[in-house]
Image (tube, grey):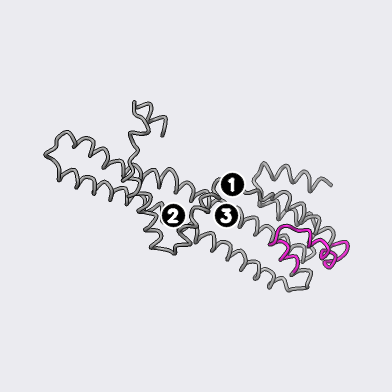
Amino acid sequence: MVMSVFASGGTLLTYADLPSFLMVVVGSFFSVMLATSIPNAIGMFKILGLTFKVPNYDMPGIIKKLMAFSDKARREGLLALEEELEDLDNEFMKKGLRLVVDGTDAGIVRNLLDIEMGQVDGRHASKITVLNMWATLGPGFGMLGTVVGLIAMLKNLEDKASIGPNMALALVTTLYGSILANAILMPMTSKLKAQNGTELSVMEMILEGILSIQAGDNPRILAQKLLAYLDPPTRKVVEAEVLKD
């Protein structure tokens, strides 16, 4: 976009306009604040920061850890896993294995962890919805700013020299609305949705691994279940490691 501006012979200052910024960015933000709560609206900036972080779920590492737990449980029994729980940094896995060690029924374990996953998904969805709302409102405020600018221009048609500059400024608000929605917020929303989907997939993989350990499945069967969650290139590498015997 910046290259296009300079290629057309313009400068970034050509498109800088404080009233348009206030109308589109600040105006649409306050509309989001009306639609939700003030903490949720302000919290969007923290959510935007998450899009610049690449979460490392380390699915291969999780698979290897679950495989090790499975092997130990088959050799020494489920109670032997209790001493391993304190060193776990994955709270979801720790909670599930704790239920298994305590002798909780498999159906109850699945139900409790499904609830946990549903709550995580719900919290993420509510934040993404607020961000998506801002993306939806941006272009509308851009058009609103354009209409306001055109009205001001039409009321001053006697000054012919000001028509061109005023028209340009009126259109800047539409530009700002499009940039806010299409170049910033919508891509960020899509990225957060993808991150949420990956996190839920990891949690589902952990759930299946925990239930397989509780059922006493053969580690090779467990490996086949867990490897299904990996993309093909990663799966080949991890499969060669965990099924090398």
Residue drawn 36% across the image and 30% down it: 11
- Left or right: residue 196 versus residue 29 is right
Label 2 amino acid? Asn
> Alpha-carbon distance for marks 2 and 3?
17 Å
Q: Which of 101 and 106 is in front in this view?
A: 101
Mark 3: few/some/many CA within 10 Å (<14, 14-19, 20+):
some
Q: Mark 3 points at which residue?
A: 197
Question: Does dot 3 land on a helix, a strand or a loop?
Answer: helix
Q: Is the magenta stretch mostly helix, strand or loop?
A: helix
Q: Could you tell which of marks 3 and 1 lies nearer the N-terminus?
A: 1
Q: Mark 2 points at which residue?
A: 132
Chain part drawn in magenta? 74-98
Q: Mark 1 points at which residue?
A: 53
Considering only vertical position in the picture, is 65 above or below 108? above
Q: Which of marks 3 and 1 is in front?
A: 1
Whether residue 92 is in magenta: the answer is yes
Whether residue 18 is in magenta: the answer is no
- Left or right: residue 150 versus residue 38 is left
Residue drawn 47% across the image and 57% down it: 42
